[in-house]
Image: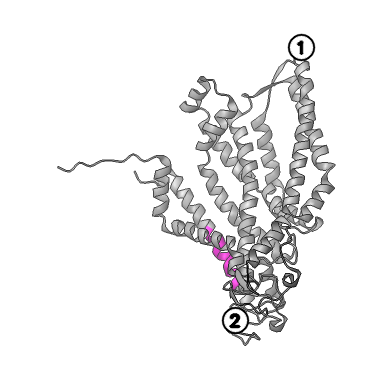
Amino acid sequence: MKMETTLSYSPRARAWEAFKKNKPAYYSLWAVGVLALIAILADFLAYNKPIIASYRGEVIFPIFKDYGERFFGLNLWHPELRKANWRELEVEWALWPPVRYAPEELDLRNAPAVGPFEEQIINSSVERHYLGTDNLGRDLLSGLIHGTRISLTVGLVSVGIAAIIGILLGALAGYFGDTSLQLSRASLWMGTLGVFLGLYYGFYVRRYALAEALAEGFFSFIGSLLLSIGLSGLIVGLCWLPSRLLKRTAWGGKRLYLWVDLTISRLIEIMMSLPTTLLIFTIAAIAKPSLFLVMAVIGLTSWTGIARFTRGEMLKVRNLDYIQAARALGYNDWRIIFLHALPNSLAPVLVSIAFGIASAILVESGLSFLGIGVPPTTVTWGSLLSSARSATGAWWLAVFPGLAIFVVVTLFNLLGEGIRDAIDPRLQEH
């Protein structure tokens, strides 16, 4: 007699099995993985220097030398080779990327806008522009490959910023509500004063330093931002110290409820009422063009949906048995939130994140198409699509960038729908 065994899957395992049954979503996940690999290896797929070459008996790794200068400020190049045209340089042997053009490189011999099937002025067949060039003679395929890195970076970083803000605020609002968190009057007033002073001296006073760091580069901005955060934290801590003495008085020791849920919910409503697109246009038009600024603005204006999802899940989770058991064991609220309640409340947030990445890519493409926010020298899918406006006969400048935007946005939308269906218990087979 055959014995049938029934495996009891965890909710995550059941969700994964349901997700794999959704073939469009499952294949979209693989396609996104391929796009991520293309973004990581963009310089090894399209660049105007070899991956490895032998020049005068010396083995050189040009791409890695450029990485050393670009990211670490190291002076690794010999002056003779720093500005050399490697396609015309006499080398013993070399391993080239499939596309031998950098995205911002100008090929004036094939400008303006030479098509992929038209005659091109090249030295050999390996130097052909496989998808044509734009008005400035930039290789379209190289721009699409490197644009993948920019689009995915904008989507992931901006949604990452939105997720951090939305998950934190949503978790606090859902867990504490309006009658669970108490502070002494002294701690509340001195803490509030410290927050305002910290924001004023840490960010408003240092706004020009932050702007200059943002213009210099990503790492300079991160260092300046960490300095502002540290200064704000120090000011908050100094303002908090006197509250320890004031709590001993009758006035300062009185306990007050904090309206956490009410305050955060009103903040969400205020942010949702703002014209986000107009706000992004305004900030991008006033500030110096920067890709990091675009990511920050998109992230700071798109966290409300994630916050609402997290708040709703926390309202359901906070009264479940395992949360009550954690409280009975004497665990503090912060441990319960981040180690017990929040990990079991993030499933719907993943859906919002997937759709948010697609939305962020569309916003960045729109800004690039309009020439707002992104530096003019940065090649993106939107900027390539914009170049088709001044070259009405160059169909390839409209078709290929537009197709890339359409495919990536569709993949993330299919991925979001697959995650939504997989975590919905009403759609799972029992």
In the rendered image of this protein, does residue 386 appear above or below residue 180?
below
Give me the residue at 75% from left, 66% from top: 376
Across and down, in percent, residue 272 comes to 67, 46
**Residue range (magenta):** 400-411
Q: Label 1 near label 2: C-beta < 8 Å?
A: no
Q: Quadrant of the C terminus?
A: top left
Residue placed under numbered mark 1 in the picture? 250
Give the residue type that dot 2 points to. Answer: Pro
**Where does the N terminus fall, quadrant-wise?**
top left
Mark 2 residue element: loop
Identify which residue is drawn at 79% across, 35% down. 198
* Relative image position of residue 160 (x, y in whole percent): 62, 48
In the rendered structure, find residue 137 and report the number of the disc placed on it. none
35 relative position to 235: left or right: left
Q: What amino acid is labelled 1 in the image? A: Ala
Q: Is residue 339 part of the magenta span, yes or no?
A: no
**Label 2 sits on residue:** 116
Which of 108/157 is in front? Answer: 108
Classify 10 Å Cα crowding around label 1: few (below 14), some (14-19), many (20 and above): few
Q: Nearer the viewer, mark 2 or mark 1?
A: 2
Mark 2 and mark 1: Cα distance apart in space: 81 Å
Q: Is residue 365 above or below residue 314?
A: below
* Image coordinates for residue 247, horizontal then vertical, percent: 75, 16
Q: Main secondary structure of the magenta part?
A: helix
Judge whether residue 206 can be spotted in this image: yes
Marked residue nearer the N-terminal end (2 or 1): 2
Using a 10 Å C-alpha cutoff, classify the residue at mark 2 as few (fewer than 14 neighbours), some (14 to 19) or many (20 or more). Answer: some
